[in-house]
Amino acid sequence: MKILLSGIQPSGILHIGNYLGAIKQWTELQKDFQLFAMIADLHAITVPQKPDELRQNILNTTMLYIAAGIDPQKSTIFIQSHVPAHAELGWILNTMTPLGDLERMTQFKDKKEKQSEVFAGLFNYPVLMAADILLYQTDVVPVGEDQQQHIELTRSLAKRFNNKFGETFKIPEGFIPPQTARIMGLDDPTKKMSKSAASANNYIALLDTPDEIRRKVKIAVTDSGKEIVYDEEEKPAIANLMRIFAAFAGGEPDDIEKQYQGKSYSDFKRDLGELLVEKLTPLQQRYQELSEDPESVMDILRKGADHANKIAQKTLHKAQQKIGFLV
Ligand code: ATP
Ligand code: LTN
């Protein structure tokens, strides 16, 4: 079975962009792949985090993975810092990463602007991500569009290592879901939906209450005109809402266009609000059950770490041998 790995940083509350762009894809792909679903806490600390909030976010993210349908019986759910090989291989790869490659990373440039002080970890972040992926001999990495450049760097580091020291790492492919790779903010369709957005009206969090969901959809920005037509250029706000609708309802934005011919923005928004409430309620119920049973969540994480450690350690050992460490 081919191997699939991905991760999310536990740096805030997850939203429907994270769900459609990442978690939902994983739940579908876990049927055909061996999935490693990681909680990237080492990545989260590349910008300042409050310890109590971080601890809570790590647990929340884990519970949301499970509540959204990642099956711990089938897939490996684990916390990045529970597998020390990530930091170790990350260091080795850092010694082989051209500075210029890191300087070109657009995520670094964006994130740097938002920080009052920038630390080396933020700059080296993509190298740690390469270690995450390469340790599991991953075939496919499903991510949103914003991560594409990091996958390219991973491929180039793996090739560089293999060329210099002999075949060690599998060269992974990125997988970017076409319709949902970039869900835009509800308050600004020119920027991606983001958990670090200034206003909570930018996103629908997976744990928003039904009333919050309805309210946020109602006040979401729309375009001029009245028709519900799918036009990315002329009607970016409605197009974004239509992609969200199609992704949750199943189908394509064009189907929505047909369905809403002659109807108003407010009809469409009302239905979208109800659809989101209907689709998120079972996830929220499952989340609630898990939060009442933290021991079972910890148990899943322990088993996940055991399995991940075995595989990661094997690859790390191979890499250490190849570069001449006494192992
Ligand atoms: P931030 O915006 O605060 O950096 P984020 O919301 O982008 O955080 P990440 O942890 O960086 O969240 O991303 C987790 C996963 O969700 C990644 O695979 C990312 O590509 C995907 N993702 C994030 N935002 C979106 C979005 N708006 N549309 C589609 N996918 C997204
Ligand atoms: N950088 C990613 C999170 C992440 C990741 C990974 C994704 C860390 N390690 C390995 C895929 C594979 C993000 O911010 N979304």
Image (spheres, helix red, strand yellow):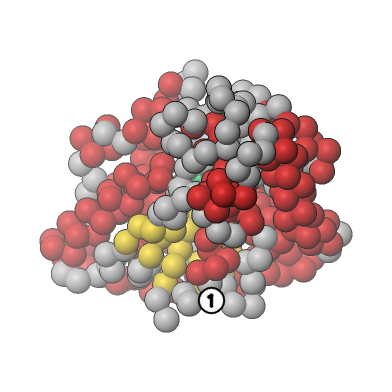
Q: Which of 130 and 208 is in front in this view?
A: 208
Query: Quarter of the image holding residue 74?
Result: bottom right
Q: Nearer the viewer, residue 122 or 16?
A: 16
Q: Which of 223 and 149 is in front in this view?
A: 223
User: Under tag 1, what secondary structure?
Assistant: loop
Residue at 64%, 78% in the rendered image: 73
The answer to whether 28 is drawn above or below residue 234 in the figure is: below
Q: In the rendered image, which quarter contains the C terminus? A: bottom left
Callout 1: CB less than 8 Å from ligand 1: no
User: In x, y percent, where is residue 42?
Assistant: 51, 47
Residue at 42%, 81% in the rendered image: 1
Instruction: From the viewer's perspective, tell me whether residue 209 is left or right of residue 6.
Output: right
Q: Nearer the viewer, residue 216 or 325?
A: 216
User: In x, y percent, where is residue 320?
Assistant: 29, 65
Residue at the limit of the structure toward the bottom, as seen here: 1
For mark 1, what is the residue? Answer: 31
The answer to whether 271 is drawn above or below residue 86 in the figure is: above
The answer to whether residue 62 is visible is no
Instruction: From the viewer's perspective, tell me whether residue 282 is left or right of residue 102.
Output: right
The answer to whether residue 199 is visible is yes
Instruction: From the viewer's perspective, tell me whether residue 115 is left or right of residue 101.
Output: right
User: In x, y percent, where is residue 308?
Assistant: 51, 70
User: In x, y percent, where is residue 282?
Assistant: 78, 60
Residue at the limit of the structure toward the top, as seen here: 116
Crowding around mark 1 (Cα neighbors within 10 Å: few <14, some 14 to 19, many 20+) is few
Residue at the limit of the structure toward the front, as seen here: 262
Residue at 50%, 69% in the rendered image: 29
Residue at 35%, 47% in the rendered image: 148
